[in-house]
């Protein structure tokens, strides 16, 4: 009976150690993901800001040489959800 008790305690100890190692790996993975998200957020903002600048067409007047936005430009959609609303392939946005 004493041997069965020791084997049970040993099994429990090994199981808890294994679960602790799994938890450590998961915590490390989560920390890495959070770090990447913090690094990517300003880059995404910068990228989208630059993209918005590129999306507005500019026209140079041949008479004055001035660069200006044409008055006939259709207003851009600023919310990406508006673009893909109802489109089944883009529900993750």
Image (tube, helix red, strand yellow):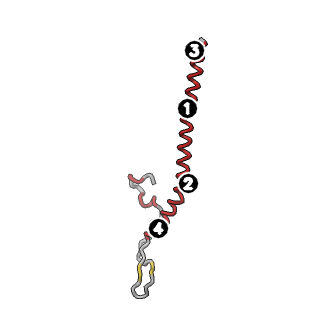
Residue density around tag 3, few if under 14, some if 14–19, many if 20 or more, within 10 Å: few
Task: Specify which label sits upstream in the sequence, 4 or 3.
Answer: 3
The label nearer to you, 2 versus 4, is 2
Task: Specify which label sits upstream in the sequence, 1 or 2.
Answer: 1
Q: What residue is at 42 percent from the left and 61 percent from the top?
A: 83
Q: Which mark is residue 19?
A: 1
Q: What residue is at 59 percent from the left and 11 percent from the top?
A: 1
Say whether marks 3 and 2 touch (CB < 8 Å): no
Residue density around tag 4, few if under 14, some if 14–19, many if 20 or more, within 10 Å: few
State whether residue 22 is above or below residue 14: below
Q: Which residue is mark 4?
A: 52
Q: Which residue is mark 2?
A: 38
The label nearer to you, 1 versus 4, is 1
The label nearer to you, 4 versus 3, is 3
Task: Specify which label sits upstream in the sequence, 1 or 3.
Answer: 3
Q: Nearer the viewer, residue 33 or 68?
A: 33
Residue density around tag 1, few if under 14, some if 14–19, many if 20 or more, within 10 Å: few
Q: Secondary structure at mark 1?
A: helix
Residue 10's quadrant in the figure?
A: top right
For this view, does 68 lie left or right of residue 21? Answer: left
- Work out how far the residue at label 4 is from the one at label 3, CA to CA, in angstroms: 70 Å
Q: Secondary structure at mark 4?
A: helix
Task: Specify which label sits upstream in the sequence, 3 or 2.
Answer: 3
State whether residue 36 is above or below residue 80: above
């Amino acid at each position: 009976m004493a041997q069965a008790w020791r084997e049970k305690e040993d099994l429990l100890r090994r199981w808890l150690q294994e679960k602790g190692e799994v938890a450590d790996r998961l915590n490390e993975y989560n920390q890495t993901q959070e770090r990447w998200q913090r690094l990517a957020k300003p880059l995404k903002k910068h990228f989208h800001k630059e993209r918005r600048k590129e999306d507005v067409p500019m026209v140079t007047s041949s008479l004055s040489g001035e660069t200006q936005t044409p008055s006939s430009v259709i207003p851009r959609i600023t919310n990406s959800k508006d673009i893909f609303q109802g489109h089944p392939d883009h529900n993750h946005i």
